[in-house]
Image (cartoon, rainbow, N blue to C red):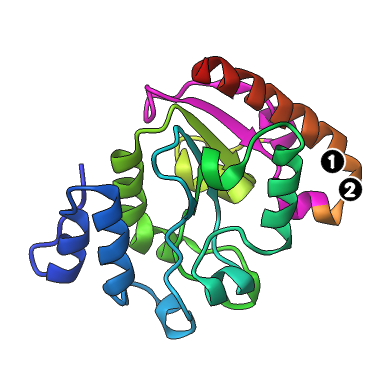
Amino acid sequence: MSQFDLFDTTQNKVLDSRSYPEFKETLIASNCDKCELFHSRTNIVVDRGNPESKVLMIGEAPGANEDMQGKAFVGRAGQLLDQMLAELGFETNRDSLIINVVKCRPPENRAPNTEEVNACRPYFKEQLKLLSPKFILLLGAVALKHTLRDKKDFSMKEEVGSFFSHTEFPQAKVMVLYHPAYILRDPRKKPKMTEHLQRFVTEWKKLKG
């Protein structure tokens, strides 16, 4: 259920959107000031890709390139993800939608804090409700922690690469992946990431028929 605030007409207008395009347009126009990130942002970054697809990828927050362009995952990490998936026959802009837990860039590209995530959470939950994906790919530990809040203590090594179900998303197959920025920092993990992406693409092709 969306978190309506009787005294916040701007937020309520966003949460009352009847379609995903309306939600996106209204959120961008809202000039949201729910947390301190609004002071330093250039653009509210809602997503990148195709909302009609059945694949949703979730990252943590926009970076510098995303903040400038107003699109999610367009920097080096996003380009790497696009490339790795393209090699497996998956085109991210056509076959998926990519979003973040928060919609504004934290200073110095740090991870968003709990206050910032909580301020953005009503919008995040509304996105998930409007999209109803069949696959959810969680990119990195921060996305996992803030999307599935019942996972308090976990090891990324144990979480990555396998499908599982979750009561919050009963219609979707969920998979945790390494964040592509982590692969840029440690290229030795790239073969393992490729293996995980291949597992996902294989299942996705079954859905496509």
Vertical relation: 118 (above or below) 92? below
Mark 1 Cα-neighbour bin, 10 Å: few <14, some 14–19, many ≥20: some
Q: Is residue 111 left or right of residue 2?
A: right
Vertical relation: 157 (above or below) 18? above
Q: Is residue 185 left or right of residue 181?
A: right
Total numbered badges shown on the rendered structure: 2
Residue 183 visible, this angle: yes
Task: State the residue in front, 208 or 128.
Answer: 208
SS assignment at label 1: helix
Quote the CA–CA distance across marks 2 and 1: 5 Å
Task: State the residue in front, 150 or 42.
Answer: 42
Residue 119 sits in quarter: bottom left
> Which residue position holds label 1?
190
Instruction: Tell me what residue is drawn at x 77 percent, y 37 percent.
Output: 87
SS assignment at label 2: helix
Task: State the residue in front, 5 or 92.
Answer: 92
Was residue 177 drawn as part of the magenta stretch in this picture? Answer: yes
Extreme residue toward the bottom, this view: 39
Extreme residue toward the left, this view: 6
**Amino acid of disc 1:** Lys
Task: Answer whether labels 2 and 1 touch (C-beta < 8 Å).
Answer: yes
Percent of width and height locating residue 92: 59, 44
Residue 8 visible, this angle: no
> Which residue position holds label 2?
187
Vertical relation: 51 (above or below) 123? above
Magenta segment boundaries in residue numbering: 155-183
> If the image is split into quadrants, where does the N terminus sit?
top left
